[in-house]
Amino acid sequence: MKIPKFIIAAALASGLVSVSAETVAPRYAGPYPAAASKKGLQVELVDDALALGVKHAGLNFNLCALIDPQGGTNSPVWETGGRQYRFHRGYLESLDKRIKALSDQGVVVTLIVLTYQSGDPEVNRIMVHPRCETNAPNRLGNFNTVTDEGRRWLAATLEFCAERWSRPDKKFGRVAGYIIGNEVNSHWWWANMGRVSMPEFADDYLRTVRLAHAAIRKESGWARVYLSLEHHWNIRYAAGDEQQSSPARALLDYFARQARAGGDFDWHVAFHPYPENLFEPRFWRDKTATTNVLTTPRITFKNLELLPAYLRRPELQFHGQPRRIILSEQGFHTPARADGETLQAAAFCYAYKKIERLAGIDAFILHRHVDCDQEGGLLLGLRGNQPKAGDPQPRKKIYDCFRAADTPEWWVAFEFALPVIGLKNWDAVGR
């Protein structure tokens, strides 16, 4: 039976978010877009990304910068559940421009949906979890699906965006996926709702992801919704205690059980398999990423094949199919040594060849495009941020490897990496 959309909207807004989007015919139907390769990038410079031949793009999307609770008359409006919701035109159109430039060239665009604490107390009250610490690290809060107003705004915002970026005419560009939050198994740093146990956090996050899925699928029949997890698999991030972080595997298993108990839905996984030491790009040396053992402390590029194998378990599948995986944020540091750029580039080459052949993983979205001073000394970019020879963002060795990765020139560009890694050839990698 098809459920009328006004009933779904009312159920979502009231918090009855167990209504399944699969029972509702979406406004726009169609298949998930096929990409020519798995090569992706968290894009900062759109023209440069297109010149590099990216096939996937990750873009940060701050809901707190989008919503306009003051209701400015120049702000676009969305009506749902008998109410109007307005959104800041400037931020929206800046996203439109980037999304359209990428998707018009066949790039599969995925948004990383976040709620940064803003300078507007009213925006924070609506969008940010009421238990979020005001001094939360990175200013990132969890989503507010605790209050009726928070649930209504989140559902309306995601409906509005999914409609806008799923239109058949592609007037504003096309979005294929929405990652809800960031590295939520280390929630204190990346999705703060205060000090809570893993089950408390996971129950709250499940409510949010379920609401997001229903709102997005109401408009778009193909858009995927992802959980975000980082590489601590059977251990938690050591900088935090058990009320600040948890092992990704424990959270994933608990989330899946609770989702099934409340009515399962089509969620997927965005994973970050950074090396065990973020300052050491040679992931093949990782000691805490054991191969062929699900009790491994971490899942990094060294043992990444464990993740799709784990998601093939029947209790984690949806309608008999494994959840899809994208690698939405991970990169390789450039050590401060003579061969630093060579080590960074070799790590990318090895990881790319492994992921290219690994079934169940749809995208390898590299972080970062340009080195950033606000990443605690990490230099993960394809480009540096220290000017050389008049270039304010000079290309590093990894740049040409990335450009060639899914082209016939890959072999020539990657050949230098074999002796660095200790391989004779690429034939067995990822098979």
Image (cartoon, rainbow, N blue to C red):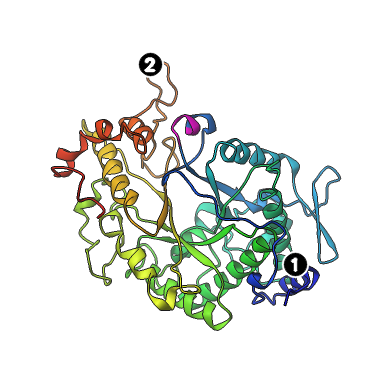
Which residue in the structure is indicated by mark 1? Answer: 149
Quadrant in which the N terminus is drawn = bottom right
Residue, x 22% and y 64% (percent of image)? 290
Residue type at numbered disc 2: Ala
Residue, x 39% and y 74% (percent of image)? 250
Which residue is more in the foreground, 214 or 366?
214
Q: Can you give x and y, in whole percent of width and height, for residue 240 in the image?
A: 39, 65
Quadrant in which the C terminus is drawn = bottom left
Residue at the top extreme, as displayed: 389
Q: Can you give x and y, in whole percent of width and height, for residue 4 in the image?
A: 78, 71
Category of crowding for the residue at label 1, using alpha-carbon neighbours closer than 10 angstroms: few (below 14), some (14–19), many (at least 20): some
Which residue is more in the foreground, 135 or 426?
426
Residue type at numbered disc 1: Glu
Which residue is more in the foreground, 339 or 93?
93
Q: Can you give x and y, in whole percent of width and height, for residue 195 in the image?
A: 50, 71
Q: Can you give x and y, in whole percent of width and height, for residue 399 in the image?
A: 36, 32
Residue 79 located left or right of residue 269: right
- Residue 52 magenta: yes
Residue, x 26% and y 68% (percent of image)? 296
> In terms of secondary structure, where does tag 1 sit?
helix
402 w.r.t. 218: above or below: above
In this picture, which residue range is highlighted in magenta? 49-53
- Residue 310 magenta: no
Q: Are marks 2 and 1 in contact (CB under 8 Å)?
A: no
Tag 1 or tag 2, which sits nearer the N-term?
Answer: 1
> In terms of secondary structure, where does tag 2 sit?
loop
Determine if residue 125 is in view.
no
Looking at the rendered structure, which numbered label has been put on residue 389? 2
- Work out how far the residue at label 2 is from the one at label 1, CA to CA, in angstroms: 53 Å
Q: Give the main secondary structure, helix, strand or loop, of the magenta stretch.
A: helix
